Image: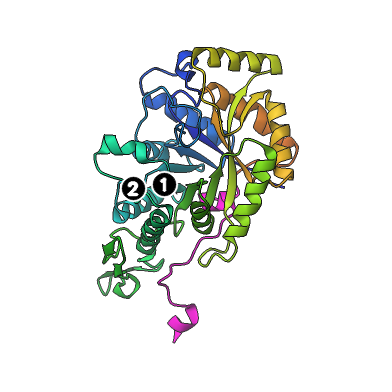
Amino acid sequence: MHLHLTVSLAGSGYHPAAWHVSPLPPRPDAAAIQAMARTAERGRLDAILLGLPLEPSVGGIGRVNTTQLDPLPLLGSLIGVTRQIGLGAAWTLDYTEPYNVARVFATLDHLSYGRTAWIARMFGTAALQPRIGRPAGPDDPAAYCARAGEFIDLVTKLWDSWEDAAFALDKPSGMFVDPDLVHPIHHIGEHFSVRGPLNVPRPPQGNPVLVLEDPTTTIGRRFAAATADVLLTSCVSLSTAAARYRELHALSAGRARFRDSPRILANMVVVLDDTQAAAQQRANALDALVPPAEPPIPRFVGTPDQLVEQMVIWRQQDACDGFNVLPAVLPTDLDRLVDAAVPRLRQLGLFRNDYAGSTLREHLGLARPLSQYAAPAAERAR
């Protein structure tokens, strides 16, 4: 049994009062963010996820009361200070275009040598509308999922529009790129019309990892289970999480393009300290400053060893494949996760001692998909 672990970084932490007590600078500080990224990599975590400040309508733990940097350039800034850990960034598909998403993440995947993930934020993004100034996708869940499905399908078509062998680099003939291996996609759909191809070569991972949050509707859940590489769930109890895990795996059966089942990670806010009493005292002090909303996701308060015990139980009961840890206060709870909880997981044989591969897909045990435009090898040999 092996656990997957990711960590979400946002501002001063995932408790709305975190900024009162966090040792981080009150203003955005590149050195502090980079130090946390190196800490997560030192722990050999699968990935860092950026841009997931879980708002009440989505995660119920209140707004993160700190400056939120754009996750895309933030991801780019972390590429140079890390070497192996995955890097995921949120980008809503309500307020952008598929070509932009495909181009940016293909570029980031090349720059990181295959370590990126696109967190495709969907449901619950209506709060952005007044800020951005144009409406989001359709309100009807079925129509919304239809548009989202076309959007994501179009992004993957653009990533696949260059075959892996498209670079000819034939100096005698002067052929830089083999035009037979770069494909216009000629996509004409209900919501988008894109000729393609992408003007960036195929990403090192083939397709960067696609992360989706667990929707609240049955239609949305069916869509997410059939589409995502990684699903983030938010279930308060073990029994609810186990039922959701079974449901999502059943819904993911028969995925056409993907050989792997999605990796299902449970969101968990953590408040850690050396003793249960000290951790509870920390949590009480934070809650006294700014009471969090009633959380529809788990909040763990205790010691790193107790956290490991809970993680083991959830994994043994098939409630998840691992966890997306949301530190209540940064970097305090991240440091305790990496320096105390992760070593205990290693002692139990439940977590890696080192990275076995170089890409995020390899960390997650996900196959690299073939380009959907690549001809079968036997056909190409004729």
User: How dense is the environment of label 2, judged by Cα within 10 Å: few (below 14), some, or many (20 and up)?
Assistant: many
Label 1: state its secondary structure: loop
- The residue located at (65%, 17%) in the rendering is 280
Q: Is residue 354 left or right of residue 181?
A: right
Assess whether residue 363 is covered by the magenta stretch: yes
Give whichever of 376, 317 is nearer the camera.
317
**Number of on-image labels:** 2
Q: What residue did someone put label 2 on? A: 94
- Asked where in the image residue 70 lies, by quadrant, the reply is top left
Which percent across, then down, holds residue 360?
51, 49
The reply to whether the C-beta atoms of the residues labelled 1 and 2 are less than 8 Å apart is: yes
> In the rendered structure, which amino acid carries the disc numbered 2?
Asp
> In the rendered structure, which amino acid carries the disc numbered 1?
Met
- The residue located at (41%, 22%) in the rendering is 65
Give whichever of 82, 217 is nearer the camera.
217
Q: What residue did someone put label 1 on? A: 122
Which percent across, then down, holds residue 221?
52, 52
Please say whether residue 16 is visible from this viewpoint: yes
Q: Which residues are magenta?
A: 356-382
